[in-house]
Image (spheres, rainbow, N blue to C red):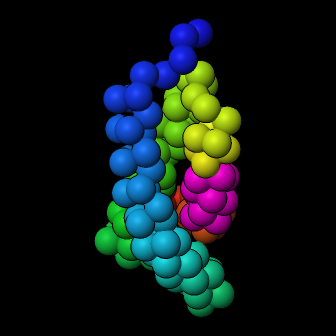
Amino acid sequence: MAKMEQVQVDDIQKQMAKLRVALPVWGTEANDLVELARNAERAAIQMDERTLQRMRGLLQTAAGWHDTLLYWEEQDAAPALSADIRVLRASLDAMRAEVAAAAALFPQQQT
């Protein structure tokens, strides 16, 4: 595979900067959703549809970024860029796993 062009590297770095800003926001959202799911499970109540939509939206967004990061990781990037991509993907995957576990508490509600 040929080395990445600088234009492509610059674009990836710009998108990764946006992702670095978004990850803490999504992390807070994930924590809120996980806590809501746990509270609903303890209280034996169903989560409302709006909360479930938030959860599904976060999972879809994270899945899209996961696929993008995986694609970038497969490119012939410089070692430092590859390492940055792997770190971001690992952070994103950890958040996805938490939200997915919370979502699994309510399988009867998932569509």
Residue 94 lies, in percent from the top left, at 66, 59
Taking 4 as reference, is 18 above or below it?
A: below
Q: Position of residue 71 (x, y in %)?
A: 53, 29
Residue 40: where, in percent of width, then height? Answer: 55, 83
Residue sitting nearer the eye, 78 or 74 = 78
Q: Is residue 97 visible?
A: no
Which residue is the extreme one toward the front?
A: 6
* Nearer-the-camera pick, 48 or 98: 98
Residue 8 lies in the magenta stretch: no
x then y, percent, for residue 20: 47, 61
Q: Residue at x 59, y 53 (%)?
A: 88
Write the start and end of the magenta stretch as one range: 86-100
Residue beneath the point at 32% across and 71% down: 50
Q: Is residue 6 shown to the viewer in this render? A: yes
Q: Is residue 12 left or right of residue 77?
A: left
Count how many numbered circles sit on residues in the image: 0
Q: Relative to residue 76, is residue 93 depicted above or below?
A: below
Q: Quadrant of residue 105?
A: bottom right
Residue 91 among magenta residues: yes
The N terminus sits in image quarter = top right
Q: Residue at x 49, y 72 (%)?
A: 24
Which residue: 36% across, 63% down? 53
Question: Magenta: predominant secondary structure element?
Answer: helix
Q: Is residue 60 left or right of residue 2?
A: left
State the residue lying farthest toward the top. Answer: 1
Q: Is residue 27 above or below residue 13?
A: below
Q: Residue 101 falls in which quadrant of the image?
A: bottom right
In-front residue for pair 97/75: 75
The image shows residue 5, relative to residue 68, as above or below, that is above
Q: Is residue 41 left or right of residue 26?
A: right
